[in-house]
Amino acid sequence: MLKIQNLSKKFGNKTALNNINLEIRPGEVFCLIGPNGAGKSTLVKIAAGLLQPGLGEVLIGGFDIVKTPEKAKALAGYIPDEPTVWSAITGGEFLQIVGALYGVSPKERVERIPKLLSMFGLSGIDQEYFEDYSRGNKQKFSILAALLHRPKILLVDEPIVGLDPTSAETAKFQFAEFAKNGGSVLMVTHTLSVAQAIATRVGFLENGSLKAVGTMAELRRRAGLPEAATLEEIYKKLV
């Protein structure tokens, strides 16, 4: 569903990404972890079409994000690390606008939006303005907007930050269910417990380069650690 080939990106003299090659298949939750400044958000933003790659290519469902951006973006749902939305609209209006942009029919929006609102218990506050929402509620609406058009892949940048514990568990469950139903998830997170709980594979990114990619079992073997080793222990050993 997502294929990244020889992807590099520079900002001035700084190399943000260095020859990244990665494939994410349907049914997979791929968690990308690494220190601040490693290039994680840059990679997700390039995959979402918000930044241009310097070299290489990114394909979503076989469509090049640069050459055929509308077809590629139609298959993806993007959840940013900072849920910034025009403050003078309501949550309900935001979902209606996003649905319209992605070609979701008015009839389907009427059916889908109430179900999505109930996912995080947002029914009732969808008529309030974004400027009055907490950071956590803004994040919840961003998650729902990404799911509204039934994408094939979710591109997620730090989804748990700002969510209360119950909502964080709901988000984890929804991402896992999305993959279980055939979707793909690329998730950037610093919350290693979240990655360990739902990832089918994990990638360690450091200084713009992928240092290791694999399942938990594969990464434990590479790190020379026992079967019970946590992702935090593996990360400390390999990065």
Image (cartoon, rainbow, N blue to C red):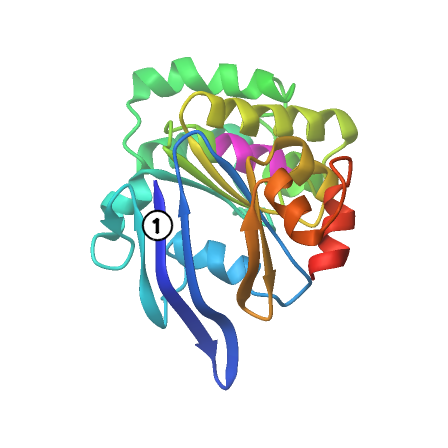
Please say whether residue 129 is one of the residues in the magenta stretch: no
At x 41%, y 37%, the residue is 153
Q: Residue at x 48, y 59 (%)?
A: 43
Q: Main secondary structure of the magenta part?
A: helix
Q: Residue at x 63, y 39 (%)?
A: 217
The percent position of residue 180, horizontal first and vertical second, equals 48, 22
The local crowd at label 1, few if under 14, some if 14 to 19, many if 20 or more residues have their Cα within 10 Å, is some
Q: Residue at the location (33% across, 71% down)?
A: 55
Name, please, the residue furthest toward the left: 67
Q: Nearer the viewer, residue 23 or 182?
A: 23
Residue 189 vs 38, above or below: the answer is above
Q: In the rendered image of this protein, does residue 209 appear above or below residue 3?
A: below
Q: In the picture, which quadrant includes the N terminus?
A: top left
In terms of depth relative to the viewer, which is nearer, 197 or 220?
220
Q: Residue furthest bottom?
A: 13
Question: What residue did someone put label 1 on?
Answer: 3
Q: x%, y% of residue 211?
A: 58, 62
Report the amino acid beneath label 1. Answer: Lys
Asked whether the viewer can see residue 6, the reply is yes
Of 193 and 130, which appears nearest the observer? 193
Q: Is residue 177 above or below residue 79?
A: above
Residue 117 placement (x, y as % from top left): 56, 20
Q: Is residue 81 left or right of residue 8?
A: right
The answer to whether residue 39 is above or below residue 98 is below
Give the magenta part as a residue range: 138-145
